Each structure stands twice: as C-alpha cells, then as structure tokens.
Image (spheres, rainbow, N blue to C red):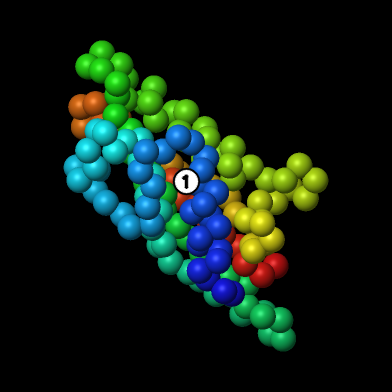
Amino acid sequence: MTREPIYAALFALLSGAANFTTASRRLRHWSDVASAEQPALFMAQKGETAEQRAPLPPKWRARVDVYVYAQAPDETSAPAAAMNPLLDAIETALAPDAVTHVQTLGGLAAHCWISGRIETDEGVLGGQAVAIVPIEVLVGG
C-alpha cells in the first residue's frame, strides 16, 4: 500500500464535495474555527489494519474520521439545516461507480465508503453543528 496518494485522493474528493470555506488534513477543534471559516472539513487518519493472505500481498483497511463543522446562519435556524446538505454532499462524493459498484479513489483503492455511525452534535453547542463521519478505505482485494 502506498499511503499518501490514497489519503491525498480521499481528501481531494471530500474537500471538493461541497463549498467548504476551510478544508485541511490538520484537525482543529470547532472552538478554534471561526464562523467565517465555516463550513469546514478536516480529515484525520485514525488507523490501519493489515490482513495477511499469503502468498498474496496483505489487504489493508485504513480508517479515517472526517470532521465537518457548520454554523447556523442566524439565531432561529437549526444548525442541522446547515449540516445536512454537507453530509449529503460527502455521501454523494463517496457513491460507488454505477458500473463497478465501488468507489476506487481513481483506481488507488479497492473500495472506499462511509463505515458506521455518523456522530453529530446539534443544539447543545448553540449555533454550532459538528459531525464526525467514519470512512474506511480497502486497499488490496
């Protein structure tokens, strides 16, 4: 597995999925991201697991968390109304190819998908909405 091209391709795909004002692979806490810098997307590598398949090369599963921050536009709007279209855009960007039924990040991975529960916080933080999207990338098939 050649890691950096895979993570770079995933970041390029996700950061271009919506009109993010800020996008970075260096995670920042939402309290350090001003309203004017939002909506924001941050990608953090979470871990990798190898599955040995001798005599074949290992199959790798890379886990990434994508942090999405959005502010409600005013005091009466629900922060989720700002967040939901961003999550929809991420889901759409990761949609599998219609023919192969996999998302290969331009041929760098065997498959890439949202894997598990999307954690959200909306309301407790006032006008701030936060979502953490778990993504898994399969390399080697």
Q: Is residue 4 above or below residue 100?
A: below
- Please name the residue shown 40% across and 53% down the image: 43
- Left or right for 64, reference 5: left
Nearer-the-camera pick, 47 or 24:
24
Q: Secondary structure at mark 1?
A: helix
Q: Residue furthest right?
A: 99
Which kind of residue does numbered mark 1 sit on?
Answer: Ser
Q: Quadrant of the C terminus?
A: bottom right
Q: Quadrant of the N terminus?
A: bottom right
Q: Which x, y percent locates residue 135?
A: 50, 52
- Please name the residue shown 47% across and 28% down the image: 85
Q: Is residue 127 visible?
A: yes
Q: Is residue 61 visible?
A: no
- Please name the residue shown 56% across and 64% down the image: 6
- Left or right for 131, reference 140: left
Q: Is residue 92 above or below residue 51?
A: above
Q: Which x, y percent locates residue 121?
A: 30, 35
- Left or right for 132, reference 33: right
Q: Residue 84 appears in which quarter of the rendering?
A: top left
Q: Residue 111 appears in which quarter of the rendering?
A: bottom right
Q: Residue furthest bottom?
A: 55
- Please name the residue shown 66% across and 70% down the image: 140
Nearer-the-camera pick, 80 or 40:
40
Q: Which x, y percent locates residue 44?
A: 38, 58
Label 1 packing within 10 angstroms: few (<14), some (14-19), many (20+): many
Q: Is residue 66 above or below residue 40?
A: below
Residue topped by disc 1: 15
Q: Which x, y percent locates residue 4?
A: 50, 69
